[in-house]
């Protein structure tokens, strides 16, 4: 149990579907993050939320839409995705706000997304 | 710009052998932090260690040890007497504090080294 829970663990969707990924952290942390992990690529930071406010959008296409209703929950809404969006999507949280270099990020197990 | 290089893509060792995973980083900052994470087949990245740029003391935690050398910009990770449960992808990462002390949102990861420990 890492303290960061992601659901679903696996998701298969067509290009015209709309789906959402959910992340919940039970650690009392103040910052939450979405990452994309593709095969043979470094982890790519997508979005950052500090105290529920989005502070970073790393040039992510608009077909990915994050939502952070409170400091414990983070969603990633997906619509009209492309096959190249297939990847492992990881959520993380940190006690310190993003922007504090020393902060340790704690990760969930990820959602394995396949876009057909 | 910050960069992390893990030159070893995959390593295979026989159980009980020692193995060292290499990490070389690039940064222009004098204040920065280095991390190692483990990603087992289940997917989650597990935090292993954080080291700041002013602390070059090597660290040992059970079978794990880390060798930080600023002179060569390296932060290598050694597993002693490897076990099958050590099989995973290991990531080295860097976070810069910036000249003003304000951090970057970016935790820069290397591409990872896949370690397979054969029984």
Image: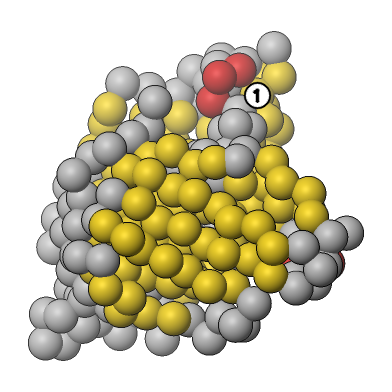
- How are the colours assigned in the image? secondary structure
For label 1, the residue is B117
Residue A33, given in percent of the width and then of the height, sits at: 39, 61
Question: Which residue is farthest right?
Answer: A116
Q: Mark 1 lies on which chain?
A: B
Q: Is residue B65 visible?
A: no
Please tell me which residue lies in front, B57 or A76: A76
Measuring 36% from the left and 70% from the top, which residue is drawn there? A48
Residue visible at 47% across and 58% down in the picture: A75
Image-based side of B36 in relation to B52, left or right: right
Q: Give the percent coordinates (x, y) of residue B9.
A: 68, 52
- Quadrant location of the C terminus of chain A in the rendered image: bottom right
Res B114 → quadrant: top right
Q: Position of residue B76 (x, y in %)?
A: 42, 49
Q: In this view, does A70 lie to the left or right of A47?
A: left
Provide the secondary structure element on which disc 1 rests. strand
The answer to whether residue A110 is visible is yes
User: Looking at the image, is B118 positioned above or below residue B33?
Assistant: above
| Quarter holding residue A40 | bottom right
Position of residue B90 relative to residue B4, above or below, is: above
The correct choice, above or below, for A10 with respect to A95 in the image is above
Of A26 and A42, which appears nearest the observer?
A26
Instruction: Name the residue located 84 percent from the left edge and 60 percent from the top edge.
Output: A14
A7 sits left or right of B28 in the view: right
């Amino acid at each position: 149990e890492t303290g960061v829970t992601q659901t679903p663990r696996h998701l298969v969707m067509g290009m015209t579907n709309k789906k959402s990924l959910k992340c919940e952290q039970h650690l009392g942390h103040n910052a939450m993050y979405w990452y994309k992990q593709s095969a043979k690529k470094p982890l790519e930071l997508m979005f950052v939320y500090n105290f529920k406010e989005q502070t970073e959008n790393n040039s992510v296409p608009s077909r990915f839409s994050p939502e952070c209703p409170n400091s414990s929950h983070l969603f990633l809404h997906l619509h009209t995705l492309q096959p190249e969006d297939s990847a492992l999507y990881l959520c993380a949280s940190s006690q310190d706000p993003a922007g504090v270099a020393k902060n340790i990020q704690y990760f969930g197990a990820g959602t394995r997304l396949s876009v057909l | 710009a910050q960069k992390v290089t893990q030159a070893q893509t995959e390593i295979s060792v026989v159980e009980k052998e020692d193995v060292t995973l290499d990490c070389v980083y690039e940064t222009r900052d004098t204040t920065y932090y280095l991390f190692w994470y483990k990603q087992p087949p289940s997917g989650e990245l597990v935090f292993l260690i954080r080291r700041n740029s002013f602390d070059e003391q090597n660290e040992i935690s059970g079978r794990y040890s880390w060798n930080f050398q600023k002179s060569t910009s390296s932060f290598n990770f050694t597993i002693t007497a490897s076990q099958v449960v050590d099989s995973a992808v290991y990531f080295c990462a860097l976070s810069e504090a910036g000249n003003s002390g304000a951090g970057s949102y970016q935790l820069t990861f290397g591409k990872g080294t896949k370690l397979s420990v054969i029984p």
